[in-house]
Image (tube, rainbow, N blue to C red):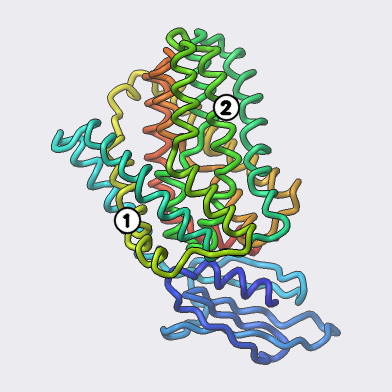
Amino acid sequence: MKDLARDLWHINAPSKLARISLTPQGGGILLHAGGVDLGAQPPAAGAPHRAGCEAGWAGRRQDPRSQSQISNFKCERTRSYFSATLRPMPPSLIAFILIFLTGALFRSLNILNKSHAERLASVVFSISLPATILVSLDSVPFAPTVWKLPAAAALVTLPMVLIVFHLARLLHLPRPTQGGFLIATGCINSVYFAYPVILATLGDVALAQAILFDLGQTTLTLTLLYALAVWYGTAASGSRSRTALRRFLSAPPLWALACVVTLKFLGFRLPAWLRELLLPLHLTTTPLASLVLGLSISLSAARHLLPLALLGVIVRMGGGLLLGFAGAYLLNLTGIERVVVILVAGMPSAVTAVIFASETGLDEDLVASIVALSICFGVALLPWLPQLAILLLGSE
């Protein structure tokens, strides 16, 4: 029961509205945490009486049976089934969607264009994101099983590459198109989609897990996936490969990750003054990243490549979600770690794929179409993300 309460607290950590207390409830369990009403049916006849738990937040309790959105959960320790009523999307997630739509509108009206998106992305990548990595990981203790998150990324990406490799050959696509299809479905949009969405939906604790997952994903993106782009491409050269490696080794997020991980393994934390200095920069990551996504949307090429692009989106998001389930099962992940792995595995395609396609001479129109459509689908599905997170947490 403490594990379940802890996980629900993590889900609502950004609002800090939840408070947990334990009380008897007629042999059953009635749980309310951060806007989530959980009311249990009484245990079966002959089952031992167990203490229930109740957690409240600053708001009026509602009868969960009177709500339209009901989900069943099974708590292993109490063998009780829960019915859950979910509150509306967190305000931060609503803001993410509104800023994204504003950016897309500005791009469609030609008020801002691709060059503005690139400059803004550089600010996020070089300043905001490193601050987010330092602040988020500094406050999260590393468990002995921390290696499982990068390993989960490998269990998602490597099977995805193998599946798409054979699928592209079956479709008899031209070689540059095969490579573009493979890169677009293999790259996960972590920096500008997964990070801000996980932060807005599940809070700092979950964001730290997403960053560790991305450590494995980014390593594979900049090694295996880039090597495949070079192999399939027609414009790559040795100098460009060296440039990509130099760019990877000099990336500010990589140095921020190395710094905070080293400090934590040595038993140190960031100084208070440095944390206070970085916190405002950390808070700019979500709004700026959502604006970058909106400004990056261009559906002009997607109209001509719609069937293949839609297939790529289904493979990237639907296939990624299924591989996330498989990876979490194989590594025996539970709680927030399991939720994060499954959700991030099903995220849209990364803008990095477009950069790779441009540098190596792949089918850039197809890659840009898959990226744009997957981001649009991802944003359209965001209103249901909190419900999905609770369902994943309760289905263990």
| Residue 340 shown left or right of residue 104 in the figure | right
Separation of residues labelled 2 and 1 (CA atoms): 29 Å
Q: Whole-percent x and y of residue 124?
A: 34, 45
Secondary structure of the residue carrying numbered label 2: helix
Q: Amino acid at mark 2?
A: Thr
Q: Residue at x 32, y 39 (%)?
A: 122
Q: Amino acid at mark 1?
A: Thr
Query: In the picture, which quadrant includes the C terminus?
Result: bottom right
Q: Whole-percent x and y of residue 284?
A: 32, 56
Does label 2 or label 1 sit earlier along the sequence? 2
| Residue 298 shown left or right of residue 310 in the figure | left
Q: Whole-percent x and y of residue 341?
A: 60, 49
Give the vertical position of 107 relative to 234 (above or below).
below
User: Does the image show residue 307?
Assistant: no
Q: Which residue has dot 1 on it?
A: 284
Q: Along the line of sight, which residue is nearer the eye, 285 or 4? A: 285
Give the vertical position of 111 relative to 210 (above or below).
above
Q: Quadrant of residue 46?
A: bottom right
Say if mark 2 contacts mark 1, CB within 8 Å: no
Secondary structure of the residue carrying numbered label 1: loop
Q: Which mark is residue 223?
A: 2
